[in-house]
Amino acid sequence: MSALDLKVRLQFATAIWDRISELELSGVEAAARLGCGSTEITRIKQQKVEGFSVSKLCEWAEKLRLDVDVVFTGPSTDAHAERRHA
């Protein structure tokens, strides 16, 4: 696995876990929503991404209604500007 490939997988895993936490889903609920087992949820939480394809991680991100572009670019600059002025 190349360094870039690992970085992409880790970004997805972090975004997916953040979304699971934001939605306050249990491991079982998250697994049901993603169509995977609780072992996969644990691996995402621990960022053990070996064996996960980028396409599978992307599919899971979409099931959680994550904007894939935001996974790579972060929140919009407008949101950052609003926080600075608050």
Image: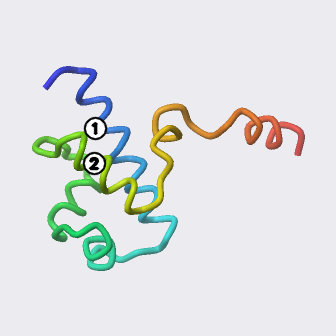
- Residue 85's place in the image compared with 41, above or below, is above
Crowdedness of circle 1 by 10 Å Cα count: few (<14), some, many (20+)?
many
**Residue sitting farthest toward the left:** 51
Mark 1 → mark 2, Cα distance in angstroms: 7 Å
Please name the amino acid that badge 1 sits on: Arg
Q: Nearer the viewer, residue 51 or 46?
A: 51
Extreme residue in the right direction: 85
Amino acid found under the numbered disc labelled 2: Leu
Residue 78 or residue 3, whichever sits in front: 78
User: Which class describes the residues within 10 Å of circle 2: few (<14), some (14-19), or many (20+)?
Assistant: many
Pick whichever, 76 or 20, lies toward us: 76
At x 89%, y 39%, the residue is 85
Q: Quadrant of the N terminus?
A: top left
SS of the residue at dot 1?
helix
**In the figure, is residue 25 to the left or right of 86?**
left
Labels 1 and 2: the sequence-earlier one: 1
Cβ–Cβ under 8 Å for marks 1 and 2: yes
Q: Residue 81, located in which quarter of the rendered image?
A: top right
Residue, x 28% and y 48% (percent of image)? Answer: 57
Q: Is residue 12 left or right of residue 46?
A: right
Residue 28 on image: x %, y %:
26, 78
Which dot, 1 or 2, sits closer to the camera? 2
The residue beneath circle 2 is 57
Q: Position of residue 51 (x, y in %)?
A: 10, 44
Q: Secondary structure at mark 2?
A: helix
Looking at the image, the residue that sits furthest to the top is 3
Count all numbered tags in the image, as a single digit. Answer: 2
Q: Position of residue 37 (x, y in %)?
A: 16, 70
Residue drawn 13% across the image and 41% down it: 50
Rendered image: mark on residue 9: 1
Q: Is residue 22 above or below residue 70?
A: below
